[in-house]
Amino acid sequence: YALIISGIRRCGKSTLLAQLSVDRYKPEEVLSLNFDTPLLYGFEFSDFRIVDEVIKEHEGCIALLFDEIQIVDGWEVYIRGKLDEGFYVGITGSNASMLSRELGTKLTGRHITKELFPFSYAEYCGFTGKTIGDSSLYDYLHRGGFPQYLQLDDQDVLTDLVNDIVYRDIAVRYNIRDDHSLKSLLAYLMGNVGNLVSATKLKQILGMKSTSTVSDYFSYFEQTYLINFVPKFSYSYKAQLLNPKKVYCVDNGVVFVTSSSFTRDEGRRLENMVFAELRRRYSEIFYYNENRKECDFIVVRNSVPQLAIQVCYALTAENRKREVDGLLDALSFFKMGHGLILTYNQHDKFSVGDKTIEALPVSEYFKD
């Protein structure tokens, strides 16, 4: 079978794949190849014959590890052939298309997929040796969880990451000549993390060619794991498509280096972090907006709404009613009995009628 590890660039996919192979195979049994290197730029399907020649020369090889093979059109056919020959194949890729149902058909079901993300808060604490609590949470909200950035403490790591995604993964791959519009759109999205966005309005704001172009760019950003768009909850799929979506980023550190407005808003940092933590755990996440009441996140599992979560940096006399009322409305709509308000460092628990609301620090809720 093939193991496919998919996720944003530089989140540790290659390291994980190498670690897994070390546990199972001797060094002489493994052949590794990175397709995202200048030496292999322009690699085409017909060039796989060269890879086959290298494999033949590599006596005793039974495991093949390929980084970023999705760059090569038709790679699935080649991998299926290697599986037929009895090889173990490990693959990394920075495009969500590698998890598509179509891929399962092309590989005839003989694959296991895993999504990898930058370090979660708990992983960040383990990696840096920090303890769970306010201090480490503050650091994580500002630095994010990309391993190389945490090691080097150099913002150029994150700047280069964003540039690689914009130019190499999107502009080159999809033959986009107007990369200025692409960068402008990304800057706008990063500056509006946690806010509602729509392709129609952004076409007007940024003066782009068409709504469909903006929608395509949305899709490209999401495919590279850089940006996520959270739809409004509705039992109608059409309504989900038509309503504005809330925009979030995979990692706070990336937003920090691309948006000056984000650096000043601790509440949006916290909300973006909560989304990223939820995204690691759940595939279906929505926001709630009915009766002029809002709830930040509705988590759906097996087509059933399971969790209602409000995010508030600090509950105060000024915002408490708004936050609680929005959560209560969502709980009533979904017939749930318990709701969460995730905060920076506050605890609270109270009942309103037959509903229980619990306020917890983010560091406590996501400590595992």
Image (spheres, grey):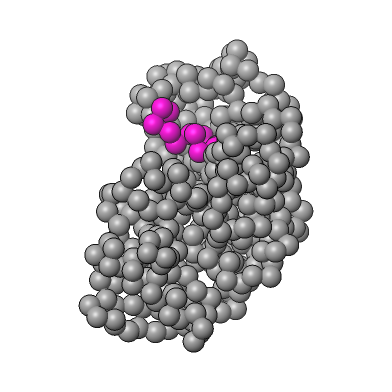
Residue drawn at x 39%, y 84% is 348
| 90 and 346: which is toward the camera | 346
Q: Is 331 left, or right, of 172 in this rendering?
A: left
Q: x, y percentage for residue 153?
A: 73, 62
Quarter of the figure with residue 87 = top left
**Relative vertical location of residue 163 with respect to residue 144 in this rendering, above or below:** above
Q: Residue at x 35, y 83 (%)?
A: 349
Which one is in front, 142 or 33?
A: 142
Which region is colored magenta? 91-103
Q: Nearer the viewer, residue 5 or 281?
A: 281
For image coordinates 43% across by 21% down, the residue present is 80
Asked if residue 269 shows in the view, the reply is yes
Q: What residue do we see at 56% from left, 51% from top?
A: 197
Quadrant for the C terminus in the image: bottom left
Q: From the top left corner, tell me how far across and down residue 154 is, in percent.
A: 76, 59
> In the image shown, does 143 or 206 lie closer to the viewer?
206
Would you say residue 92 sits in the magenta stretch? yes
Q: Tag count in the figure? A: 0
Is residue 70 positioned above or below 255 on the image?
above
Estimate the x, y position of residue 214 in percent, counting from the top left: 61, 39
Outermost residue, bottom direction?
317
Quadrant occupied by the N terminus: top left
- Residue 28 in view, yes or no: no
| Relative to 309, residue 99 above or below | above
Taking the image as shown, residue 78 lies to the left or right of residue 205, namely left
Q: Is residue 110 magenta?
A: no
Quadrant assignment, res 56? top right
Q: Position of residue 13 (x, y in %)?
A: 55, 45
